[in-house]
Image (cartoon, coloured by chain):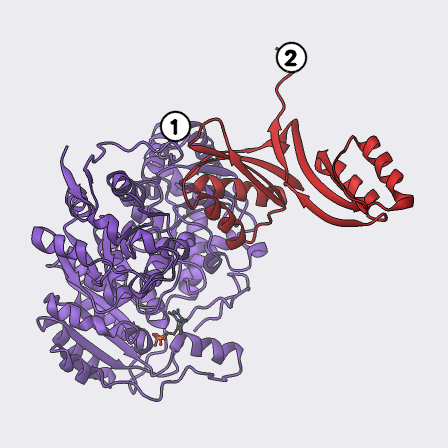
Amino acid sequence: MAKMTGKEMVVEALKREGVEVIFGFPGGAIIDVYDTLHKDGTIKHVLVRHEQGATHAADGYARASGKVGVCLVTSGPGATNTVTGIATAYMDSVPMVVFTGQVPTGLIGNDAFQEVDIVGITRPCTKHNYLVKDVRDLPRILKEAFYIARSGRPGPVLIDLPKDVQNQVGEFDYPEKIKLRSYHPVIKPHTKQIERAYKLIEQSKRPILYVGGGVVISEAHNELRELAELINAPVAMTLMGLGGFPGTHPQSLGMLGMHGTYAANMTMANTDLIIAVGARFDDRVTGKIDAFAPMAKIIHIDIDPTSIQKNVKVDIPIVGDCKIALQKLVEVVKKEGRPKEVWKERLEPWWDQIKAWQERHPLSYKKDDSVIKPQFVIEKLYELTNGKAIITTEVGQNQMWTAQFYKFDKPRTLLTSGGLGTMGYGFPAAIGAQMAFPDKLVVDVAGDGSIQMNIQEMATAMEQKLPVKIVILNNQFLGMVRQWQELFYERRYAATEFEVVPDFVKLAEAYGAKGFRATRPDEVEDTLRKGLETEGLVIMEFAIAREEGVFPMVPAGKATTEMLLV
Amino acid sequence: MRHTLSVLVENNPGALSRIAGLFSGRGFNIESLCVAPTLDPSLSHLTLVTTGDDFIIEQIIKQLNRLIDVYKVVDVSEGEFVEREMALIKVKAEDETRAEVLRMCDIFRCKVVDVSPKTYTIEVTGPESKLKAVIELLKPIGIKEIARTGTIAMVREKKTA
Ligand SMILES: Cc1ncc(C[n+]2csc(CCOP(=O)(O)OP(=O)(O)O)c2C)c(N)n1
């Protein structure tokens, strides 16, 4: 067995785990690992401008590729700057390993320079974390960290590396297999439960498939589609589920919940059977819980038992990987179920009703020739990219308009902060996605507020020559908050109006990128076309209708059937 | 409902604060918490008393199981179980009450472990209900200080083969 220093172990483990790129920012407490990484030269390092950017970029890389995202930062302020990114990844179950430098073990607890208890700080927002006190533990911890991050319900894992441990010498005994007696994610669902689920499906006359991010994570989209088509059920998706089922499919109802479609929310409210797959009955989806789907029986498939029965009572809990569970369910339906045509006929009245809802209130907005409507920008973006781009979003109205008006057909094409709702996520995430797929078109749809939260990463994108396209929907407002103020606070716009907004075109130029601006509706298509065709990093800024709202909208705490419509 | 959970947890640094943090972070209640080594030096045994309806208790158990360091969780109060807690109680014992305190000790089978001219310190062991009873009865006499261990518990073995 080879003797190695801790810092060499880190680099060696990264290579063995197949890590090709990492995102980070150096400092005294991690300089040793940086030095080793530099000398070794096999792993690509992306130098960001802020550690939050590193975590979101690693997150975007992971969401786009399905691989583990990796970050490397220093102790103290470097470590604390990662917290928002870690929490974002935690909420959306993104596999990530974050290395933080730490003061030497002898100084830990002494309030040393740049010391912070990052293991304590991140305990509630990591899947697991480690403080390495002895280099002999390091190989095992490295192996475990990657295993824990990517297995079961994925999530971020943090490894805190004291400076002396990085330089200690030990045996590099990298375990082949992991044996963690206290960690056994349930992957295979219970056969009995699958059969019971099938019985409910068979009896149902008004079923709905309710699909969340779990379908995307477990790559169960083909199985989902097969099941949906076999039983002819409508499919509604959460924000995280978009792309898990083709948005252009005739059985797709689009997104449900607070800003979901009228048809999706009405279908959910009137269903007799919810088949929930990799979704967690988040309050943004259920609205007022007592009024949620009152007639429905519920089948709930999820790899994380804590998601089941947390918010609603479930009739058939199925713990396991979504892909395997759906495979099994499809098998049973095929073997025992009625033929497809019979299903079709049986659900005809249900579909008549759903189509009536769709016709009554389709997703729409008031068109306008004098001012740019943000929905129109997204529609055009969809057209011009043929729906083929990887889209990241910031948070707010920009995020919801994108979810509503860009139709996602493939998984891993929408990267957005769903659980935590992190402004500043989209642009660094786009950098990560572009690193994973250099040849794909990656577009960040942003608000003028959110983009300013990590705008400094433009330098990172320029340095890496990443041709990310940024679409800024500029309303000079923190739009989503303004919308709430308009609707529920008698238009008191407390702290939501920006008096100063930078000239984004000049800003792009300051970084050496290109910038284009549209201020009239008839400039939208041209600006998008020009922006998308221009090589390299581009900002496209659209001066949109300042007080445009996102509709439909279910006011917080109301039943999902009480939607405010356009 | 009061539930007593018996948790086996890896003897790793931070494991206890992860469990305590889970309760505070999710708004679950901890009534008492007791941790000690087991025969296996790599595992610690933790007894946790909490309250909640079935829904909450189910969540608590699932959330505990989700922690990487948690080996096993048993809700011992689901079936027959024995539980014990110990308390040291320093009680005022002057002239007219000295005999009264000793009598009480006798009835409850407490032990006097320290004596001073004005106090007795007594040790009492039993289920929480017994401790409560002793404390209530000693209160009027005057309790100066109490130290309690929190509950430990075990499932009862089946009596028939
Ligand atoms: C880091 C962070 N701070 C605050 C919020 C609360 N918040 C949610 S949406 C929003 C407004 C976002 O404004 P902007 O980025 O301009 O997008 P718009 O809604 O106008 O499209 C705010 C402040 C948040 N989600 N994240």
In front: B65, or A118? Answer: A118
Ligand 1 is within 8 Å of the C-beta of the residue at disc 1:
no
Residue kind at label 2, given as amino acid type = Thr
On the question of residue A387 being in view, the answer is no
Name the residue at the right extreme. Answer: B96
Q: Which chain gets the purple colouring?
A: A
Q: Which mark is residue A164?
A: none
Q: Does residue A194 sit above or below B49 in this rendering?
A: above
Where residue A264 appears, x then y in whole percent?
A: 42, 57
Q: Residues within 10 Å of mark 1 (few under 14, many from 20)?
A: few
Residue kind at label 1, given as amino acid type = Glu
Name the residue at the top extreme. Answer: B161
In front: A516, or B19? Answer: B19
Q: Does residue A544 sit above or below B19 in this rendering?
A: below
- For the residues labelled 1 and 2, the Cα–Cα distance comes to 45 Å
On the question of residue B83 being in view, the answer is yes
Q: Residues within 10 Å of mark 2 (few under 14, many from 20)?
A: few
Q: Quadrant of residue A500?
A: bottom left
In front: A282, or B72? Answer: B72
Ligand 1 is within 8 Å of the C-beta of the residue at disc 2:
no
Q: Quadrant of ligand 1?
A: bottom left
Identify the residue shown where x is 51% and y is 45%.
Answer: A272
Quarter of the image where the C terminus of chain A is located: bottom left
Relative horizontal placement of residue A298, taking residue A529 as reference (left or right): right
The residue under label 2 is B160
Where residue B85 appears, x then y in whole percent?
A: 67, 36
The residue under label 1 is A336
> SS at mark 1?
helix
Q: Which marked residue is nearer to the observer: mark 1 or mark 2?
A: 2
Relative horizontal placement of residue B9, taking residue A235 as reference (left or right): right
Where residue A214 appears, x then y in whole percent?
A: 35, 47
